[in-house]
Amino acid sequence: MPLPRLDIDDKIKGDTRLTRKSDDVQAMQQQIAALEAQVKQLATEKNDLEISLEMITAHADTVEAELLDARNNLEDQVTHRTQELAEKNILLETEMQERTRIQVLQRNNLIFLQALLNSIPNPIFYKDLNGYYLGCNHAYEQYLGVKKERLIGHVPSEFLPPEIAQQEIAIDAEIFTSLTPRVYESSLPFADGNIHQVICHKSVFHDADDSLAGMVGIMVDISERKHAEARLKVSEKRFRQLFEHAPIGIILVDSEGHFVQTNAMFQHICGYSAKEIKQLTYQNISCEREYEITKQQLTELQLGTRQSISDEKRLVHKEGHSIWCNIAAVPVHDEQGSFQYVIASIEDITARRQAEEALRKSEERFELAMKGANDGLWDWLINEGQLFLTDRWKEMLGYEHDELDNTIKQWYALIHPHDKDEMLSHIQAYLGKQQPSYEHTYRMQHKSGSYVWILDRGIAVWDEQTGQPYRMVGTHMDLTEQKEAEKALIEAKNAAEMANRSKTRFMANMSHELRTPLNAIIGYSEMLQEDLEEEGLEDLLPDLDYIHKAGENLLGIIGDILDITKIESGYMQVSYETFELAPIIGHILDAVHPVISENGNALHTQVQASLGKMYSCKIGLKQCLLNLLTNADKFTEQGQIWFSVSKVVRDETEWVLFEIRDTGIGIKAEQIEHLFKPFTQEDDSSTRKYGGTGLGLSITQFYSTKMGGVIEVESEVGQGSTFTLCIPTTVPEHLLEQI
């Protein structure tokens, strides 16, 4: 393969590159030589460094050994010093604890002393030699109205009025000079704004070195004592006035019976003047028959063998008549216990004794009246707990007069156990004025063991002053026969009601039994009428028509009887529904028009337009209207009957009023109240003349009540009657709840 051809320029460029490479080699060789020289230099320096390092290491070992010795020596010194410091620290802590304990004791002692001072109700203070306050208790703070913290370090003149402060300073100087205590009275203004009478006790005190240190003062408030002394003087004056003007007699009698002192009332009771009474002894005014007893009692008071006298005695008036007195006496001794005199109160009770005598006689008359009464009488003295019973009272229970105790306990024991609580509650209610009278019926046990019924009546006697009852009297009436009669009457009533229920059930059963053949008779009469009409035997039709009508009439009567028996037995049910009222009115009028016309009466109707709907008993409403209209027709001949229907609102309730008015025979006023009772008509003659069972109005009232309505009746004999049936358009809720 031929070589490529090179031109001159390429050759020149190649020579140039070779020259440059040669220069680079030389430069690199120079650098290598320089590096070798540096390596040698570094090797030399390394050797030098190794030699130096060996020398330094040897020296460091020497230093390290010296440092180790020094450290060991220092640790020993530190250990020794630490032990010394620990021992000193223990001693120091022990000393500090002891000092702390002493300080606590001192502080507690100071607290105790301060608490002790504060517990003392009298004001206490203490001052230094210069008169500056060092402290005080709570009572002194209250006296000045200044807290102790503000008081300490200050002088009295900063808190007391100037004149009092000067007086206190002078007294303090005298005490510091004489070193003797000082007690004196003073009048000081307290922080409460009042001037108090006080006794001040002041004395000096010394410090621990027995050097004079200051003064302590105690104040005793004697204001109450001063007031008590003043009150005692007033009391003595009042006692003197009370003694002189007391409503009872008061006397002081010595050991010889002489009157040491008497008051005006005693002088009035006995009829003597003060001058005259001083010349007398107790013997002069005492009843001769009672004096020896009184003398003995006075001697016992003097000797101390008797503590008091409380008795009713007779005294002799100046005019010679006896006076009943209530006497209470006690001895009076001096401070050494020696007898001084007897003080006695004398109350004139003559009027009371006379009243008691009159009462005794009245009670005797009352006892006679109680014995003459047929009912058992009792008399209860409430405060004494005594009960007096007449013989008749005991006879009702079969006992003799001496067989029962006159105690409330005996009376209470005879009451039937089931009646005790109720009887007690009635008496307590009466005595507590919760009932105006006391009357109660309960059972008491007869001697035979049976129980009798008692009617208990009573009335209390009240104390006008206390308002409390102290006596109660009453009667016992034997109601056993009456109770037995009532029981028999109740049993008879129950038997009658049972018989009535049996009658009701019988009537209901019979009504069903009768309706079956009657329906057959009515049905066959209708069939015979059709047959006779087809056979052309019209002359027999009136008889069959009479049979048909009689059967329907009898069926209506039986239906009424069945309805009333259902009502009486509680089986009559009503159902409520919503219906249009106008169609009902139309059906009723269609049904009664022929009947009314047949009786020669004219029916006039007035029905309000747009009557709307009702929620009521449709069957019951029809029955009511039919009964009222047929009744009006039955008792009216050749007359007028008006039937009107309208709506009204009364007491926010919408009502429908059905009014049926006729020109018939009318109803007597005294018979209207019995009009709606079963089997009742105006009178017997009406029943015979007009027929009927008298059940229509009873059934009408039943239905009207079940619809929440009422029936109103107005009538005048010979002029006619008006029946107004008022029915609410909606059945009341309480009737709906009964379904």
Image (spheres, rainbow, N blue to C red):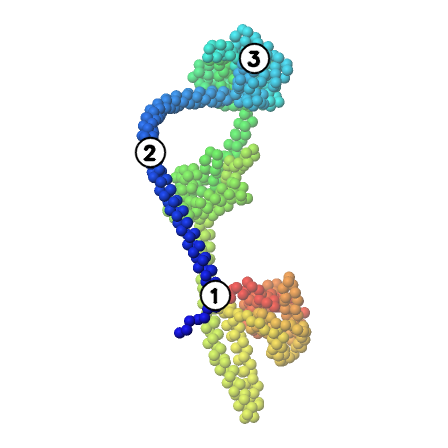
**Residue closest to the eye, 187 or 91:** 91
**Sequence order check, earlier mark of 1 and 2:** 1
1 or 2: mark nearer the eye? 1
Q: Which residue is mark 1?
A: 10
Indicate whether 152 appears above or below 178: below
Q: Which residue is mark 3?
A: 130
**Residue closest to the eye, 93 or 7:** 7
Q: Which residue is mark 2?
A: 55
Q: Are marks 3 and 1 in contact (CB under 8 Å)?
A: no
| Outermost residue toward the top in this view | 178
Label 1: which secondary element: helix
Q: In the image, what residue occupies the spot 41% across and 40% down?
A: 410
Residue 640 lies in quadrant: bottom right
Marks 3 and 1 sit apart, C-alpha to C-alpha, by 134 Å
Residue 68, horizontal then vertical, whole percent: 32, 30
**Residue closest to the eye, 656 or 462:** 656
- The kind of residue on which mark 3 rests is Asn
